[in-house]
């Protein structure tokens, strides 16, 4: 349909999301209650850091689902693809909001392919190579999780690497959910190259909301209201 004179095309939009990368239930409860995150991401080391284990996963899922998390990520474990698939199936059976994570290993890719075929929502995690990102997209997983901080720690240009991964999977049905984000600037740098989804510790997410200048402006607004009420 031709565009009427004077009318501008509708802007192209993309969805952006924050996730809480933590197993600290108190911190996550606050973020979910305030509507600041789309969901929660975990892995075995994050569970351990939060003094939790895989035994606690059913309890955590029930709590975060009730608190409004729209996606809840748990990682399958096992020393073979078969074991990983069995554990992943039990995770997926917890409910419709589960996203199953598998590592970007030979067994992990085999497990991911089987899980996608069975209808599970899958994320391939610890993606460090562009070819891994491409392979995950060919399988049809929903997300890949490259680790920015760890790429930088390894002496690589993390933003450039993840930007290339984003270009490779663009339009495939697989999205980048960037992890190992240590500062708000990390998030901004990846958003600038088209990455849509970000998971970070609650402290990093809260830091992204803060500017000293914004706080001073808010104080000025409140002071103006107070002066007006005194008249």
Image (tube, helix red, strand yellow):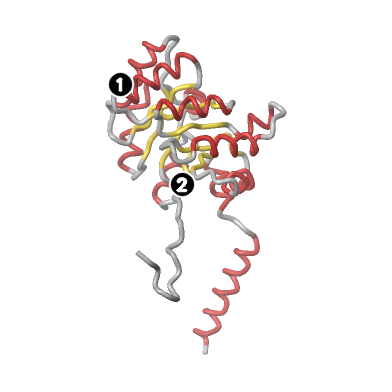
- On the picture, is 221 further left or further right than 25? right
- On the picture, is 213 further left or further right than 50? right
The image shows residue 115, relative to residue 82, as above or below, that is below
Q: Are marks 1 and 2 in contact (CB under 8 Å)?
A: no
| Circle 1 residue | 90
Residue 221: which quarter of the image? bottom right
Instruction: Name the residue: 41% across, 16% down.
Output: 110
Instruction: Name the residue: 38% across, 21% down.
Output: 113
Task: Give residue 52's position: percent from left, percent from top.
Answer: 44, 25
Along the viewing direction, whichever of 78 and 229 lies nearer the viewer: 78
Specify the label residue 17 is tagged with.
2
* SS for callout 2: strand
Specify the label residue 82 is tagged with.
none
Residue neighbourhood size for the residue with mark 1, other residues' Cα within 10 Å, grouped as few (<14), some (14–19), many (≥20): few
Residue 66: which quarter of the image? top left
Task: Name the residue at the right extreme.
Answer: 155
Task: Name the residue at the front extreme.
Answer: 2
């Amino acid at each position: 349909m031709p565009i009427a004179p004077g009318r501008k095309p509708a802007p192209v939009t993309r969805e952006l999301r924050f996730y809480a990368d933590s197993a600290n239930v108190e911190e996550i409860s606050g973020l979910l209650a305030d509507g600041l995150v789309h969901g929660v991401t975990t892995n075995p080391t994050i569970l351990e850091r939060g003094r939790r284990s895989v035994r606690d996963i059913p309890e955590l899922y029930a709590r975060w689902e009730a608190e409004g998390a729209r996606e809840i990520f748990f990682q399958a474990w096992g020393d073979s693809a078969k074991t990983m698939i069995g554990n992943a199936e039990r995770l997926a059976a917890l409910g419709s909001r589960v996203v199953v994570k598998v590592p970007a290993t030979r067994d992990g890719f085999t497990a991911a392919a089987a899980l996608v075929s069975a209808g599970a929502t899958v994320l391939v995690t610890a993606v460090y190579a562009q070819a891994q990102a491409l392979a995950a997209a060919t399988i049809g997983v929903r997300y890949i999780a490259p680790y920015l901080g760890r790429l930088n720690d390894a002496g690589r240009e993390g933003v450039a690497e993840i930007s290339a991964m984003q270009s490779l999977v663009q339009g495939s049905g697989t999205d980048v959910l960037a992890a190992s984000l240590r500062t708000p600037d990390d998030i901004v740098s990846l958003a600038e190259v088209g990455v849509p989804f970000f998971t970070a510790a609650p402290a990093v997410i809260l830091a992204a909301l803060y500017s000293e200048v914004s706080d001073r402006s808010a104080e000025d607004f409140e002071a103006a209201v107070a002066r007006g009420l005194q008249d």
